[in-house]
Amino acid sequence: MEKEEKILITRLCIASVLFALSFFNFLGDIGKFVTSLVGFFIIGYDVIFKSLKGIIHGDIFDERFLMLVASIGAFAIKEYHEALAVMLFYQLGEFLQDLAVDRSKDSIKKLMDIRPNFANVMIDGETKKVNPSEVKPDDEIIVFAGEKIPLDGIIVSGTTSLDTAALTGESIPKDVSEGDSVLAGTINISGTITVKVTKCYAESSVSKIIEMVENAENKKAKSEKFITKFAKIYTPVVVGLAVLLAVLPPLAFSQPWLTWLHRALLFLVVSCPCALVISIPLTFFVGIGGASKKGILIKGANHIETLANLNAVGFDKTGTLTKGNFTASNVKAIGCKENELIKLCALAESGQSHPIAESIVNFAKQKMKLDEKLVSEQTVLPGLGVKAVIKNKTIYAGNFKLMESIGVEVPENNEIGTTVFVSEESKFLGYIVISDEVRETSKSAIEKLKKLGINQTYMLTGDKDAVAKTIANSLKIDKYYSELLPEDKAKIIGELKTSKALKIAFVGDGINDAPVLKTADVGISMGKLGSDIAMETSDVTLMDDNPEKVAEAIKISKKTMRIVKENIIFSISFKLIMLVLGALGITTMWLAIFADVGVSLLAILNSLRALRIKNKN
Ligand code: ADP
Ligand code: MG
């Protein structure tokens, strides 16, 4: 328990004893007054202090002010118990709420805990546990079975399977061996492996993920901002009504002053909007936590709100709906030997992260050794291909648009798949046809979106029309756009947003689609686990290669928003009822405060439901 908590509990106890004492008649009026006043200061000094500070800063109308006015008023009409009770119950309520919120946050943080605790390093032939932040890139660490992998790296010896559930939400183990890369935060299930560290801890994906989730709380959703605005208007209105309530009936209808003053004070006490103020940020936090448990990183409460209101989703093709694992289905050399064509093309593509580039390099490596030092210059032409200088020759590799732009004529071809044309300056060398596979989950990803009421799905691709058409048809995507450059994609999404009033998300693999991810209402990146660009350019990151998670993210967001709305409606209507009862003098002050705490706690419990999303469908 924290020190502050202990102090508050002590204060609550002392004030409760004094409160009980103030009921004894032998104390007399003065004695009762003094006991209550002492209790009042003991329990309420911080409220008084903060409220006065608020007044000095011109920020008069907060809930503390309401409490203060109400209790001073109660003293003025000689209702000493009530004066103390207002403060006592208010503080008790705050305490219970803080407790509930802290506990909930702790339990969610535990769920999200992917933070590694130690790394084993070899020192003088013995393994020693050190803090992951002390390990530098190129150091070797040993990870035993059952341990969490502490840093990103590459396996240098050993084989094992990994449990990536903490990052991806998928529980199927992944087999890895020498040469495979591993990510911090995943768990080594079966064998001992030696890992060569590639990134220091602060740069590792796990620490970036933790940072993002922690910062997510700071990005306020509109409904949260609404509450702040609401409180700013609400409080002065309530104070105004309370004044009317105290003054009007006695003046206009010669009612007894004391009764109406009492009711006005009660009205003030009841009015504090605690349940709302606490439960709404908590609900968003719980929703973000629940999503991260499923391998979905939502980087702000504002995105939850947008996700819940989407009516359209656009997808990138390569690497998103398709695996981005191309295999070469045909090689046609025209201006040079076949092996020379493959070599030049692969060298031009070497070191690039685009799925086409990686696949071509892999294909070439099966046939020959590539000497990457021969490449002296390399330029990526997004949506077109690459340009590279190899042994003083300028080589272009890319689609027909690229060839067109440098004035190279290419033969018509009806090959199924993506054709990568290669030229040396304006001399056409030939082409490699590669084909990709649609992900097994892509079709159901679209179906699931339809089930959630998202009726408009789009595919935007830089690939040629024939390929785009086949894939869009087989996945039942409503509309596709082909042969686009990255900036065209952004333009189309921008136009869809304005002309059709769509609320649209765009899902991409983060490679050359940063502009469109920014233009969409929500940018969702997926693809290579832990790829930096993907994580940084988007609002939502799916930690694995499954486009079905888009629907999942929307579902979690819808549920979170439903709970937010429930809490808003529930606490506001409860407030209204209590206000009316208070104005009519039907309820008592203690009952009112106590009931208020109850509502807050119920709202908090309701928030926790955002964590539980059923797995089916
Ligand atoms: P998508 O929109 O489907 O994700 P991209 O915008 O990444 O596709 O690429 C569009 C097209 O540009 C590809 O179909 C390909 O023809 C060409 N292209 C892009 N990058 C490369 C590359 N590195 N090598 C060859 N061709 C490329
Ligand atoms: Mg792509």
Image (spheres, rainbow, N blue to C red):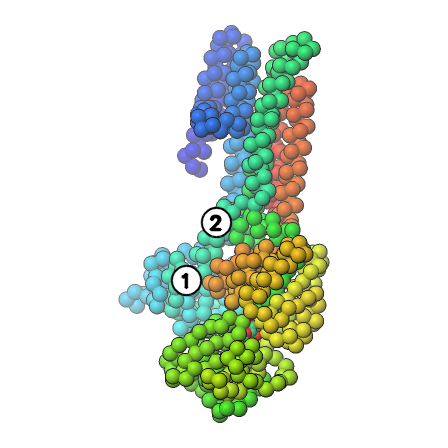
Secondary element at tag 1:
loop
Residue visible at 63% across and 46% down?
Answer: 561
Task: Give x and y (percent) for residue 408.
Answer: 53, 83
Q: Which residue is mark 1?
A: 151
For residue 41, the mark is none
Disc 2 crowd, CA 10 A, few/some/many (<14, 14-19, 20+): few
What is the residue that sits farthest to the front in this orientation? 407
Task: Give x and y (percent) for residue 347.
Answer: 44, 81
| Quadrant of the image where one finds ligand 1 | bottom right
Residue visible at 48% across and 56% down?
Answer: 209
Q: Is residue 450 left or right of residue 275?
A: right
Task: Give x and y (percent) for residue 519.
Answer: 56, 58
Which tag, 1 or 2, sits closer to the chain's start? Answer: 1
Cα distance in 3D space between marks 1 and 2: 22 Å
Secondary element at tag 2:
helix
> Does any portion of residue 295 appear in the rendered image?
no
Disc 1 crowd, CA 10 A, few/some/many (<14, 14-19, 20+): many
